[in-house]
Image: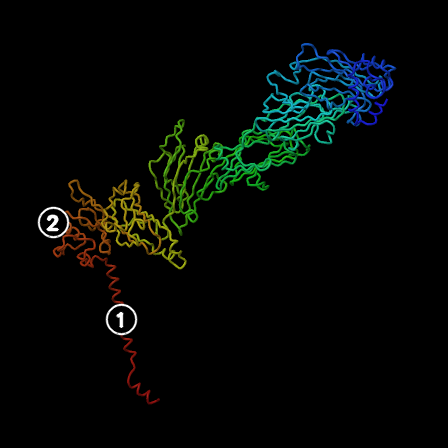
Amino acid sequence: MRLAAQFHSNNKNLWTVLQSSILDCRRPRGSGSGGGGGGGGGGGGGGSGGGGSSSDISKDHCNKTVDIFEDISSPEVSNQNVGRPLTCWYRFRPLKGSPRDFVLRLRFKKFKVGQLLNATHCEGGFLQIVDGNAKTDVSNRREPGMFCGEAEQPQTFISETSYVKVLFHTDNFTDQTYFTFDSRAEQQTEVYLRYGQHPELYPNRRGEVVQGSYCEREYRDCRLQTCYVQSPAYPGLYPRALNCRYKLHTRQPYIKLYLQNEQFAVDGQRCENVMTCPIRPIGSGNEHCPYDWLAVYDGRDEHSPLIGKFCGLGKFPFSIIGTSQYMYVEFVTSPAGPLLNTGFHFNVGNWPGHVETAGIKHGVCDWLLSSDSLKDSSASEGIFLSIAHWYPPNTSCSYHIKGHPGEIVRLYFPSFRINRIESPILKYEGDCGESLTIYDSDHADPARIIKTFCDTFSRPMEKVDFVSTSPSLYVQFDSKTGSYSGSSLYYWAHYDFFNNTRFGDPVPNTLCDEVMYAWKHPGGRLRSPLNSLIFKRTGGSDVRCQYKFVTDRRLYARAIIEVNSVSFKELPYNSNACTRCHEERVDKLVIWEERDKFQNNLACFCDNIPRAVRVISSADQMNLEMIVQGQHAITSYFKNPNPLFEATYEFAHGPLCGPITLGPSPDGELVFPYKKALAMVAGPMAPPEHHYRREKCIWELKVAAQRDLWLNLEKARFAERSCESAKIEVYLAGRLEPRFVVCPDNISLARDLPILTTAELGATGADQEPLPVLIQYTGDGQPGKNIFRLVWTELFHLPRNPDGSLAASLLQDGGCDFRCPGDTQVCIPRHLLCNGIANCPNVTHTSTLAQLTRHIEWNLEQLGLLQHAGEYSQLILHDESPEICLRRDLSELPLGKLSLIALGLCVMFGLLIAILRRMCRGAPKQPGLQHLHEDY
């Protein structure tokens, strides 16, 4: 009785007592002594039981090596053992010729031994299963633990080794203490649930056993279906007093621990009676799992973050996904427990959707995704995924997508699914347990939310572009619940950057319209939008980008656009040829201005141009519009780096230039600088000298129908002697190159410019005016530096008969009064004679004496001076010749003018006489002066 008393009084010495009892049991039968200590305990007969009765019990039921396939039962209750302590062991004899890797399956049909107290130790009796010995690779002989309680349903234990020993002990043997089990040997191929298919091909499928341990294993380079993480003795009952450690590793990140149709049973029941011991559902936490539990750590060891501590019974509802390639699993069981619970079987893999994100990671899940990082990765689009691994409750992850100044960000989801939260760590009953919010900002600004997705009521939006208005887009994921296996919002996000640099001021609420204000953007470069995303955002409609050039006449009066290149793509299926640019539905570039509330088209381009084309406005506004057909805008131009057109622009014709349009008139002059504007640029509010801009003036000189034009630079003064400082260019309609160029270094040649004939001016009909002549001045804008006076004369070209003689019948009345000298065949009207300006061009004379004589006589006849023909000694008469100007008779003047002159002279003479008479009457007389002196 001393053994029973000692076991009952002090549970700590239990294992020591049992070891002594087992050693006594190993002695030959009948050799045990009857008195106390370990010998009596080994025989199970008690301290005073005597050798004979103990030997009988041992021989029949206890302390023996049994054959496999033999049924084993607890000893029968007899007068010799009833109410006494009893200890029995059973060791199994291996089959002859059986392989060394067989395992034993023990099936407990009935079991009722002791009582489980506080679910931590056995009271009154226990059963131990020793798996392995000193010669096997694994063994739990040092701490086999204890089973106790009652199991009415058959329970199976499948050993890890081929050596198994069962030990039974009770403090008070009665008919209420019993067990029955049978056994059989099985090869590994027969235990399919443990070893899987073809175990010979995967010897380390269950991990490599750490030497000297029972269930500590290491897994390296796990792939799908190549690593099994199991409780010891799976799929049978797991032993007690376990402290198993599993170190897991995969090739790729996001290691995954998951079940495939297997049941999870770790401390799911403490007894078979569900009324007394209700089934514990699968849960996590120290309070839920105080006895047996499976702990999973996100890392290499137990110092890594704890994902969860699990126990319970049922189908494990989710996978557990780590954040790296490593995971650490710990399985602990209490020293004593029921003959229940079969443990777990997990597969090891990795989440297959891992991609490398081009960015900088801060903390656990905060990312900075910059355009520089994307450029370094040589990818056209960046990618980030929803959180695919575990994360704790109240997790917040952010993605700051940051571009360079002038860039915008596009975000879209090629794949997006919204599910219910399947694996929450913390239960949450409200709406929006998990959410994804997109901000048009560089931080979570509630005032700039583009879109929020919630797990409870949102619909996913796939292939929809979310575009920022600034260089930053901010995406934030929030979870109140946490998750063991990733987010309920599953998305695959792509982002890229677009250069949204503008050349002018963007027009609000438009796709790509801009305004170039002269006071903000006086000139520069222009091209099709750098942001090719516009070709994707019209929904199939035509893409129209309008560039408006606006000036103020106090600054400039004209806008100039020079189109350098046009590069629209040729579409083979498009039957519209670029023949009627304005009317056809083709990709084109149109330049127009508004005139009298109507659109006046200036130019249209729908094909490549061989050289630059310059378009000048006639007023202070002009528009350039790019039109792309919507049906092929995306396929042709989205992410196309080449410009569709390139141009330059500038504003010209400041106040110093004066009026834009000159003529038509028989003569006139163009003076720079314009005198009326000098006060604006040379007064007290004038800018400093180094702030004066370079001036460009463009005048349109209109010429009457059927008139030639002669230009004459009459006066000019330039501060420097180079074309860089000042240049006057004369352009004819339809010509890209100037007809004349006048610079300070060739100013002498400008006095003998050739006549521009009607044909050169581009007249198309007898009664139609030709297109205007453009006169352009480019030079310093500081007043006083450059001054010139350009005069023009419209010349009437004398008509000729087929024989070369003058067709006098075709001469217009009042249009040809004086024939200019030389062979020019031009004449001028009478009022241009003797007006102080040489209106006839200087030409070389090749006429004969007879021709010159007839020329002089004809002019004198037209002027009424033919009677003085004999007095002219010069053979050449100009419009400013003194012989003409001094001899013109007053009879040419109209009678009304002569009368007015005579009347004016009479009035002036009368006034003079009146003034003289008044002066004479007012002189003092001498007598009066004498009388005045006397009175004084």
Q: How is the image coloured?
A: rainbow
From the viewer's side, name the closer residue of 522 and 680: 522
422 or 190: nearer the eye? 190
Say which quarter of the image contains residue 452: top right
Q: How many marks?
A: 2
Q: Residue 893 placed where, x, y %?
A: 22, 58
Give the quadrant of residue 581: top left
What secondary structure is marked by label 2? helix
Q: Give residue 360's position: percent from left, percent from top.
A: 54, 36
**Residue 359 percent coordinates (x, y):** 53, 35
Going by the numbered disc 2, the residue's amino acid type is Leu
* Picture quadrant of residue 732: top left
Q: What is the three-letter code of the residue carrying label 1? A: Leu
Residue 930 located left or right of residue 105: left
Residue 115 placement, left or right of 929: right
Please give left or right for residue 533 compared with residue 98 in the image: left
Residue 8 versus residue 198: which sits nearer the camera? 8
Q: Is 605 drawn above or below residue 709 in the view shown?
A: above
Relative to residue 34, is residue 803 depicted above or below?
A: below
Residue bearing mark 2 = 849
Q: Residue furthest top?
A: 96
- Give whichever of 839, 645 is nearer the camera: 645
Q: What is the x, y in percent for residue 253?
A: 58, 29
Q: Under tag 1, what secondary structure?
A: helix
Foreground: disc 2 or disc 1: 2
Considering only vertical position in the picture, is 578 above or below 806?
A: above
Residue at 39 percent of width and 37 percent of height: 645
Q: CA distance from mark 2 to mark 1?
A: 55 Å
Q: Is disc 1 surrounded by few (<14), some (14 to 19) or many (20+) residues within 10 Å? A: few
Q: Which mark is residue 912?
A: 1
The residue located at (25%, 62%) in the rendering is: 901
